[in-house]
Image (cartoon, grey):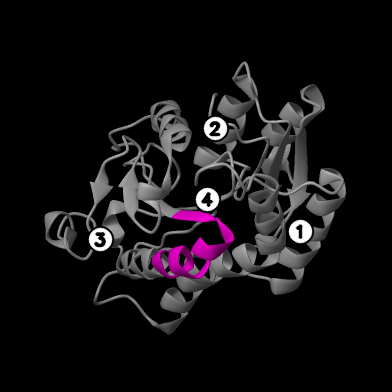
Amino acid sequence: MAWGARTVLITGCNRGIGLELVRQLLAKPSAPQKIFATCRNPDSPQCQALNELASKHCNLVVIKLEVTDDKSAKEAAEAVEKHLNGAGLNVLINNAGIMHPSTLETADAKDMLDVYATNVVGPLLVAKAFLPLLKKSAKENAGASMGCGKAALVNVSTLLGSVEKNHLSFGFVPVLSYRCSKAALNMLTNCQSYGYKADGIMCTALHPGWVKTDLGGSEADLTVEQSVEGIVNVLNGLNESHNGILIDWNGKTIPW
């Protein structure tokens, strides 16, 4: 790991991509000084693997966070700030997300609102809560170029949120509410890239590929390990040219 991030926070770390990101970052020779891994309920059985990692690595801190709850996001930011001892947060990865098997025929208000709450509102609330710490990191590294070594906000999105590419897969996997929410997340990321550029914070959306997780299913192309290995390499190379765009786990640009 040479991307220079000393402190990283990842949401949705009890399973899948979030948990594997924690594992791979911890395993790097130059692992971050602090990795903050969040989940809804750290005391639940679903967080056993994450807690076991934390018991073995002093640089891993498990933080309680319900991304759809503004109060919870602020409390999480306060907890992280205490651990940072006056330093800023280099990287925030909004990974937490949900997907319902909805179609044009089955989607209803509850489905759409539930998915938007987690996939769009959640990343917005979390980014707002941690913005002061990202700004602090950008100031601490004022001479550095944009990227994870300075201050970066990464929203985990998907190819399924691309309007231009929608025709390639809609008939195969409609997941209407998920697609719409990720398209909205892409817009949020682009807006953040303009809004936070003056602060030196790079904002990008990242498609992890079709991954064998609870969300992706067993027929997916990539294992979690393969996807995260690619993601970590992409994080390593992020720079100002990636600000406000959607890229995949290989670093290729995906059109909106």
**Residue at the (54%, 25%) spot, across then down:** 2
Q: Which residue lies furthest to the bottom in this view?
A: 109
Distance in Å between CA atoms under marks 1 and 4: 16 Å
Q: Nearer the viewer, mark 2 or mark 3?
A: 3
Where does label 4 land, which residue?
95
Where does label 1 land, which residue?
77
Distance in Å between CA atoms under marks 3 and 1: 31 Å
**Residue at the (30%, 38%) spot, across then down:** 220
Q: Please give the label number shown on residue 20.
A: 2
Q: Name which of mark 2 and mark 4 comes first in the sequence.
A: 2
Q: What residue type is labelled 4?
A: Asn
**Residue at the (71%, 56%) spot, across then down:** 133
Q: Can residue 66 be seen in this view?
A: no
**CB-based contact (under 8 Å), mark 3 and mark 4:** no
Q: Quick one: 75 or 129, which is closer to the camera?
A: 129
Q: Name which of mark 1 and mark 4 comes first in the sequence.
A: 1
Where does label 3 land, which residue?
162
Could you tell me which secondary element the residue under label 4 belongs to?
loop
**Image height check: is 120 above or below 239?**
below
Could you tell me which secondary element the residue under label 1 belongs to?
helix
Q: What residue type is labelled 2?
A: Glu
Q: Name which of mark 3 and mark 4 comes first in the sequence.
A: 4
Range shown magenta: 190-203
Q: Nearer the viewer, mark 1 or mark 4?
A: 1
Q: Which quarter of the rendering shows the C terminus?
A: bottom left
**Image height check: is 193 above or below 2?**
below
Q: Quick one: 185 or 67, which is closer to the camera?
A: 185
